[in-house]
Image (cartoon, rainbow, N blue to C red):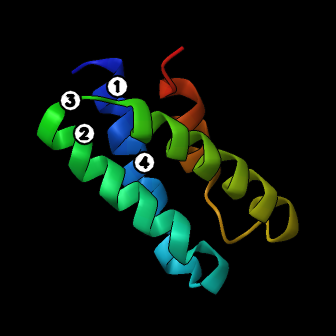
Amino acid sequence: MTKTEKFRNACMEATKTFEKIQNKEHKEIIANLEYCIGSYNFDKNPSGLLKYGEIALKELKAFKKQNPRKVNKKIIDNLEKNLPN
């Protein structure tokens, strides 16, 4: 499995986390991540996945600061570890 595929899987987990949080502000991130994951699966071009994966990472970190128990640190670590350079 390539690093980009691992990042895609981390983004899928991040999407599930955003859905569990059920914050209306995250609907756009969820939609963009789902679209980019599907697009990557189709054409293997990671540009959108990388862009919205980084946005999701920043958003999850910020949300975790305010709500430490609602976001599993493993999700954030997985995104950071697998973010292609």
Q: CA distance from mark 4 to mark 2?
A: 11 Å
Left or right of 83 in this view: 49: left
Q: Quadrant of the N terminus?
A: top left
- Tag 3–tag 1 contact (CB < 8 Å): yes
Quarter of image, res 77: top right
The amino acid beneath tag 2 is Tyr
Q: Which residue is mark 3?
A: 44
Q: Secondary structure at mark 4?
A: helix
Mark number, residue 11 = 4
Name of the residue lying farthest toward the right: 66
Specify which label sits upstream in the sequence, 2 or 1.
1
Q: Residues within 10 Å of mark 2 (few under 14, many from 20)?
A: some
25 to 43, vertically: above or below: below
Q: CA distance from mark 4 to mark 1?
A: 10 Å
Of residue 70 and residue 84, the one placed in the foreground of this image is 84
Specify which label sits upstream in the sequence, 4 or 2.
4
Quarter of image, res 66: bottom right
Residue at 20 percent across and 29 percent down: it is: 44
Disc nearest the viewer among 3 and 1: 3
Q: Which residue is mark 2?
A: 40
Mark number, residue 4 = 1
Q: CA distance from mark 2 to mark 1?
A: 9 Å
Left or right of 23 in this view: 29: left
- Tag 2–tag 3 contact (CB < 8 Å): yes
Q: Secondary structure at mark 2?
A: helix
Does residue 47 appear in this view?
Answer: yes
